Amino acid sequence: MDREGAETYLRLLAEAAMRGSLTPATARPVPNASTIMAAWHALTAVGALDPVTAEEILTDFRLAVTVRQLHREPAGQGVTAAEWLTQGRGVLRPRQAPARSPGEGWPGEDADHGRAGRFVPVGLTVPFRAGTVSGELCLMSFAQTGSGARFIAAWQVHSPSLEVQLSHHYPGLIPIDEFTVTDDRGARYQLDLTPGSDLAWPNMIRLSPAPPETIRWLDVAPPYRQAVRVDLCSGEPAPAGGEARVSVSDTKLSPGEHLLVMLAERLLTGTPEFPRQVVSGGFGVIIAALEAAGVLSPLSPVPARLATLCASLDLTGHGIAAPPTLDLPEPWLSLLAHYQRRKPEPTQMREGYVALAASLPELDGIRVNLLGLQHTQGGSVLHVLVQGRIPEPRPGPLDIDLNFPLSLWLRDSGGRWHAARPDRCHEAGRERAIRLRLVPPLTRPADSVEVLAGGRSAEVRATLPLRWRYLS
Amino acid sequence: MSDAPNGPWFTSLPPCETLVPCGQGRHSVRWEAGELRLASHADPGAELVLAALGGDTARCVEIAEAWQRHTADLTVLGIGPRGPADEIAVSWDDVDAAGQAARGGGAGGPWHGAPRLASPPRAAMARAAVRHTHHQREAGEASRRRLDMLSLLALGTGFQIRLAGQVVAAHADRLDEPDEHGSSIRPALKAALAGRVALVAEQWLGIDPDQVEVSLYRGAGWGSAELTGRGEQRRLRVSLPAWWLARVWASGLALTGRHLVVAVERAGWPDAQVLALRAPGAEPVSLSAHAVTHPSGAAHAPHWEI
């Protein structure tokens, strides 16, 4: 990795942008602050540049541009000296080591690394009633790790309130405080939606205090009703079709290629809302920045694939020099075919869930535990708990989510691929609980899915048998 | 290398002077032979001691201090002018306004508008106080640096270019030494060189500045310059040492008599001997350059003819 090349590239880009700002009448496209940000985020994401240096460069660029706007007419285009003083942030913090790119370890790695935890598929429904509110608590799985114990759950809430019926704003109505939980030794626990969750994401329910790791079962009792016993030793029996089948193969993507794959998947899963003006020229700059940093080979096939994707999605002005290629990964082709289908596919899915507790082999030092699949309100989500060498939270280029630095796809039994895109994330220590939204949602209750998880160094394929349970 | 073989880097630069509002009057601040001189303040050091004891610091003295603080600050190259035509007009009223805004502290910051808890936990309060103090110190230092920079820019283009030369001179022989944060200084110097060479090349050949590729030259001799390709593929590849920025560009010699000056053989004012290229790829020739009054009448900008 060429860290000096990365910094030089960003500084030269800022210099070109600065020059462009001096000649605003120019017809050719010139880089601007957004372009610099895209390159900055790409270089910090792959660990080629520390964020403080990147911020210094952007701040100096803004100061240089705006000091030339003092006294500029018309007044709206100028800045005052006081405004100049507050441009950007004051960058005086000590520099940090550049971020690790996924798979890159640090010395003194966390002692907890390698300690996975206890993951149990549950698949039990706990009916409840509290006043005029009734419903079901659907326990998908139980996960106990160093950062605590929690159920991954789905809720079905019925209320006479018209607002709730129309908008599904039910989380505030969940009588979570009125549930009681007792273990096999008589110890009692509270259920808590926070901090492992929030009102808009009532799927992570913590047990407080954390129970011992050796408990055999938990009785979950709704208000004034009989408890439902959750067996933590045997878990839910595997559905017909048997155990999960897993295979691992090498991929050896460079950090730059891996980032471009994540960008491509961001495009594929967010096409309708993607800000096209950000795309304009951004990919070309990102690719050039990654090449300058020595994390992307000029011979890499990934830029050409990205160019094809942009062309297929009608995104022009992407700035990628590589000519498009027909060699696209199968999941990308599947999703492109979905977008190009004129009629929406009729859905045969009812609201329901699948109890899961499958841990995939480590990818780039990251372990993904699949803890539930849910279909509700026309959308499908996969609940995962990620452990290991997860990167520090920092912005990714073009709004990609670096909290989950892996590529994850599901293939249903009809052969269609669904990209899993991070939707919500909660961090606890060296773990992240992440809700991944499937794009497109499932349309049939598949009895098995193939999971494809890709990292820099390898990819994992796992076939999981599914047993759907439906909400009343 | 800074003083040999033909004198210090500023040998081909004339003195430069401006008037600065200071106290009740306007005082002369002069740059000469690589130093800032305050004609109206015989003993700036003594004035600083008095200021430390509670007196006011004269603006001239503040400027001299700011100059000293930034003679090796690479940020100067990023913000300052790319050429004599790139005038950055900062008035002393701007500096006063910015100073008042800085003293007022401005709005915002993490302390303003933070929700108050009925009984905030002590540990959280202590952490917040530490963060607040840290943030204030950072913000205060950043604000001072920017005020410094604004004051130095207010001195005018002549001083801005001379300060850039001074910054380059502080680093040009130490390209492999890291800065105070342990980072390489080469990226900042390369960008400073590239930004300035590109504009000179545009004047020299009419080439699009974005088609100019510049590298830091570190070998013996002056470097290289070659033109390749056509149309959009046209590229001017120039390799020059960091010293070029101080000795040639800051001295106003970069483009002299339609030649790209690549080195100074014998520095001097108003006469110098330079090594210059008539065209990319050509052998450099030795030329005698003579400084004349700038066509625009600007005293700060040396203008040279062959």
Image (cartoon, grey):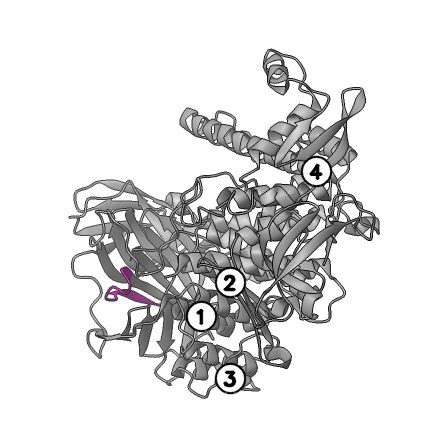
Tell which of A195 and A304 is nearer to you. A304
User: Which residue is denoted by mark 1 in the rendering?
Assistant: A260
Q: Label 1 lies in what chain? A: A
Which comes sooner in the sequence, label 3 or label 1?
1
Q: CA distance from mark 2 to mark 1?
A: 37 Å
User: Residue B223 got which mark?
Assistant: 2
Q: Amino acid at mark 4?
A: Pro
Q: Is residue A419 left or right of residue B261?
A: left
| Left or right: where A5 falls relative to A109 | right
Mark 2 and mark 1 in contact? Answer it, CB < 8 Å: no
Question: Where is residue B217 shown, x and y percent of the image?
Answer: 48, 59
Task: Give me the C-alpha separation between circle 3 and circle 1.
Answer: 16 Å
Is residue A331 on the magenta stretch?
no
Label 3 sits on a secondary structure element that is loop
Quick one: SS at disc 4? loop
Asked whether the viewer can see residue A402, the reply is no
Q: Please give the range of residues in magenta.
A: A353-367
Residue A464 pos. (x, y %): 27, 74
Please determine whether, in this image, residue A341 is positioned above or below residue A108: below
Q: CA distance from mark 4 to mark 1?
A: 54 Å
Q: Secondary structure at mark 1?
A: helix
Q: Can you name the residue that lies furthest to the bottom here?
A: A326
Name the side, left or right, on which A216 lies relative to B116: left
Which of B75/A367 is in front?
B75
Residue A366 or residue A70, whichever sits in front: A70
Residue A307 shows in this picture: yes
**Pointers 4 and 1 in contact (CB under 8 A)?**
no
**Above-or-below relation of A107 to A317:** above
Q: Is residue B162 above or below residue A354?
A: above
Q: Nearer the viewer, mark 2 or mark 3?
A: 2
Q: CA distance from mark 4 to mark 3?
A: 56 Å
How far apart are the alpha carbons under marks 2 and 4?
29 Å
